[in-house]
Amino acid sequence: MSEQVRHRGRIAQIKIYLGKLFRMFIYQKDWKMLPMAALIAGMVTFAVGTNIFKTQEGTYSGCFSLVCVSIWNGFFNSIQVVVRERATVKREHRAGMHISSYIAAHMIYQMLLCMMQTIILLGICMIAQISFPKEGLITGNFMIDFGFSLFLITYTADILSLAISCLVKTTTTAMTVMPFMLMFQLVFSGGMVYLTGAAEKLTDLTIAKWGLCMLCALGGYNTQPNVTLWNTIWQFRAVEIDGIKPIKLITDTILKENKLDEFLMEAGKYTGETMFASEASNVLACWRNLILITIGFAIVAVLILKQVDKDRR
């Protein structure tokens, strides 16, 4: 390969390394990422159930789960791709390889891989008979908006993982770092743990926060019924004050007058979140932030790998 890249231009080198990556996809069985993505998507979709896009609770938990799947896929795609051939990269860099061309080839390859994983994830959701909304906020087609959002989450996580793969020196270190990066994404997204103070400020640095915001916005979170309040009230029906059960009277009246659906919708209005507002500007802002994060990590990957000649191994 070093003879091929010597004195070649950047575009030509991108083509050379892209061809190498496609050969690795076939002959080194990198295609195994695709059935793994299908397996993970199947398990999560089975756990989420069919309440997603029907109630606020179902939409929130379902969207957060899909964000987790996308980030997981992205991390696994590229966490070892550079570090496993670091010695080769060092040798070819000295022979004339442009690091920017090498990273660009990986970015193109990983983009295609993330697209395939997104299609698989959407296919699994359809097989699970998840009821998707019909209209999208950006293109008018929900599946296009939703699919692009899932792809963007996966791809951003992928490029973050690529940067880590450029930084570490061994595959063991890479696989050790990855769980910590995953936990940071999930814990500091604000979707799993309620954050305040300094911890809350870290949410803007996570892929998961922007992913959750845009999926919930696309799914119409703020316009859906909230069932948590009703379930909580129902648990206290037996509470008695001066021989009267006031909560039972309220719940019985709501049920008797067939006002339960109206009550759940009104509860949903009070529990809506500004960041989940179903507005095109909200979704576009999330897309913009993830694209900027992706570009940032790509630049970091190039800058880090340019130091490969300083390895003393």
Image: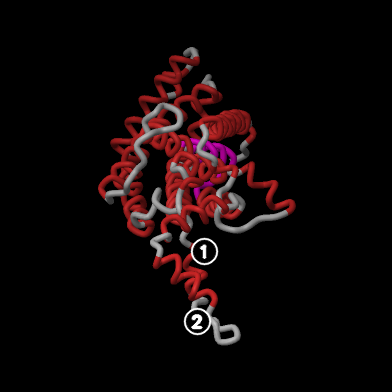
* Amino acid of disc 1: Leu
Asked if the stretch drawn in magenta spans residue 160, the answer is yes
- Side of 64 where 300 appears, left or right: right
Q: Give the range drawn in magenta.
A: 155-172
How much space separates mark 1 and mark 2, taking CA atoms? 16 Å
**In this view, which residue lies farthest toward the left?**
127
Query: Badge 2: few (under 14), some or many (20 or more) residues near its Cα, within 10 Å?
Result: few
* Residue 150 percent location from the top left of the image: 43, 39
Where is residue 302? Give x, y as percent.
58, 28
Secondary structure at numbered mark 1: helix
- Disc 1: CA contacts within 10 A as few (<14), some (14-19) or many (>=20): few
Kindly identify the amino acid type of the residue bearing the numbered disc 2: Ala
Which mark is on residue 53? none
Residue tagged 2: 238
Tell which residue pokes out farthest to the right in this image: 197
Question: Which residue is labeled 1 in the image?
Answer: 229
